[in-house]
Image (tube, rainbow, N blue to C red):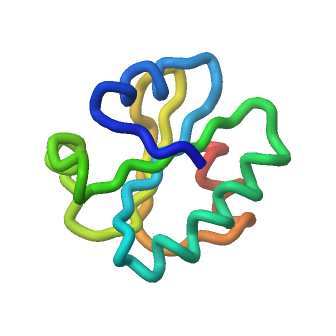
Amino acid sequence: MKVITKGEFQNAVNSNKTVIVQFSADWCGPCKRLSPVLENFANDRDDLSVFKVDVEHSQVLAERFEIKSIPKVVLFKNGSQVSESIGMMNEEKLEKFIAQ
């Protein structure tokens, strides 16, 4: 999963694909457990991109998306935020999440 910065953020979410952005930190245990779930989920899909934002290094994005708890996952479609979720997700929850 590619870690993106503030400068890369708009290009990452402004695509024809559905985009999931995981806001996380290196010290966050649940974030470390969620990352491989997201990666495996995205590997099976051509219509989905997954990125990660490290809230420690991208505080501007963390403030913009009002990150108070991590992991926080934000869903974008056609460049616009559609939904968000906080906490761990399995593949079944991810299916429902991106179907919104």
64 vs 6: above or below: below
In which image quadrant can residue 26 be found? bottom left
In which image quadrant can residue 90 be found? bottom right
Q: Between 66 and 39, which is closer to the camera in this rendering?
A: 39
Q: Is residue 31 left or right of residue 9?
A: right
Quadrant location of the C terminus? top right
Percent coordinates x, y for residue 29 in the rendering: 45, 82
Q: Between 28 and 84, which is closer to the camera in this rendering?
A: 28
**Count of labels shown?**
0
Furthest-right residue in this view? 44
Percent coordinates x, y for residue 18 in the rendering: 61, 32
In which image quadrant can residue 41 be found? bottom right
Percent coordinates x, y for residue 74 in the rendering: 43, 47
Q: Between 54 and 19, which is closer to the camera in this rendering?
A: 54
Furthest-bottom residue in this view? 29
Residue found at x 53% / y 28%: 77
Residue found at x 62% / y 17%: 16
Q: Is residue 57 left or right of residue 16?
A: left
Q: Is residue 96 left or right of residue 12?
A: right
Residue found at x 40% / y 67%: 71
58 vs 47: above or below: below
38 vs 45: above or below: below
Residue found at x 41% / y 52%: 84
Percent coordinates x, y for residue 61 in the rendering: 23, 42
